[in-house]
Amino acid sequence: MEKITTDIAVIGGGVIGLAVALQLRREGREVLLLEPNEPGSGASFGNAGTIADYAIIPVGTPAVLKNLASLLLNADSPLSIRKAALPTLFPWLIRFTYQSLPHRYRDNTNRIADLLSDASSAWLTLACEIGASDLLSAKGCLYLYETPQAFKAASSDIALRRNYGISQELLTSDEVQCLEPNLPAYEGGGLFFPKAINFSDPGRVMDAMAEAARGSGVEFIRSSVRVIARERGGVKIMSATHEIKARSVVIAAGAHSGPLAHQIGDPVPLDTERGYHLEFDMLRAPVERPVCPTHHGFYFCPMEGRLRVAGTVELGGLAAPPNPRRLDLLLSNARRVFPHLGKPSRTWMGFRPSMPDSVPVIRPSKGGKDIVFAFGHGHIGLTLAPRTARIVSAILAA
Ligand SMILES: Cc1cc2nc3c(=O)[nH]c(=O)nc-3n(C[C@H](O)[C@H](O)[C@H](O)COP(=O)(O)OP(=O)(O)OC[C@H]3O[C@@H](n4cnc5c(N)ncnc54)[C@H](O)[C@@H]3O)c2cc1C
């Protein structure tokens, strides 16, 4: 067992932990990052790559609440639940239900919008710093509506985004075709976010972040933290191989952060929304920008040398293996839009770290700011990584 002393230990090397480590190192702090796997190989690897600064609306809304039972119990819906996981998930679902009530939904939207307000500019700066600007594309993002009724049902969300000053353009079916000529006709038209930016390869962005962090002097330890406890003069964390004494610790272990928070007496209702992706190797993707058929709850993402189809939510916990039915569903829905898609070149499942209110937990722990929480980013963790890093640094500096 190796014993180490450090200024700051960051637990978890996903996009959040890496962004935090980079920020703190930039400020001259001594930083050690613990991660059992390849950095950035969790949820941060397989996402849709969108810097979704328009995504102010939480998962739980009054509309979702109205249809919750039918959504959850239909295994083919974009928001489904593994029935075996129901008893364990029940407390989270009760909280989710409460957070979907109109007054909570409004407050949650407000808090998410506040966090997202400078997400794109923060990423432009960070991408430049880590040498990943060439992986950024600025062609906007497109939502699609199958029917005029579906578009009408989205009108309150559209009005809400307008109130928050988010750029969005309503497109007719013909205008959608002009923008993305390979799409079939969408009777309900589309909604275009012209200022949205996206990454053409989240995995490569993670590699660039890890390399930049190493280059700046962040020390990486390939190990999983099992124990965290306060003791005189600091925080002790233990992994199978190391005992580390740190002045401050940042918990950024994504969907796995819950037990660590529990150990220090500050439990949080964190669970996971499992998400999936399929990839099809091809020279040129059939879309120019991330495109979301809203009724299916996934994005078509043009990526380097491939098309990624990423999204959907499955409430099902961390332990169960990927559900082949969800992958089949993703494939059949993707083929409804692009019938020529063949066999996927690869498939993936990952764990979004999800709070019932869709608001990430970025705060000092209740016992003090020697331990800071930075997890629970749900659907917008990639987007919020640089902003989260700045908030964490401000907490530690206060
Ligand atoms: C299908 C899908 C599509 C998505 N699309 C988007 C999108 O377009 N835009 C967007 O902004 N977000 C998107 N997201 C969400 C985003 O990917 C996540 O919010 C984000 O990756 C969370 O980052 P993280 O660092 O908290 O978690 P992770 O990337 O999961 O990293 C957590 C890390 O902690 C490590 N860890 C766990 N336990 C321990 C321990 N005990 N000790 C040490 N290390 C530990 C893990 O190994 C892991 O590497 C999507 C997610 C999915 C699943």
Image (cartoon, rainbow, N blue to C red):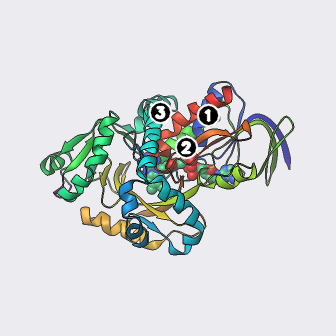
Q: Is residue 382 left or right of residue 66?
A: right
Q: In this rendering, is residue 180 above or below 9? A: below
Q: Which residue sits at x=72%, y=30%?
A: 30
Helix, strand or loop for disc 2: helix
Indicate yes or no whether the magenta region holds residue 240. no
Q: Is residue 201 visible?
A: no
Which residue does the numbered mark 1 point to in the structure image?
A: 392
Helix, strand or loop for disc 3: helix
Q: Nearer the viewer, mark 1 or mark 2?
A: 1
Q: What amino acid is found at the position of numbered circle 1 in the picture?
A: Val
Q: Position of residue 318 (x, y in %)?
A: 59, 63
Mark 1 to mark 3 CA distance (whole Å): 19 Å
> Marks 2 and 3: in contact by CB < 8 Å?
no
Which residue does the numbered mark 3 point to in the structure image?
A: 127
Q: What amino acid is found at the position of numbered circle 2 in the picture?
A: Val
Q: Which residue sits at x=72%, y=51%?
A: 223
Q: Is residue 3 visible?
A: yes
Q: Position of residue 317 (x, y in %)?
A: 57, 65
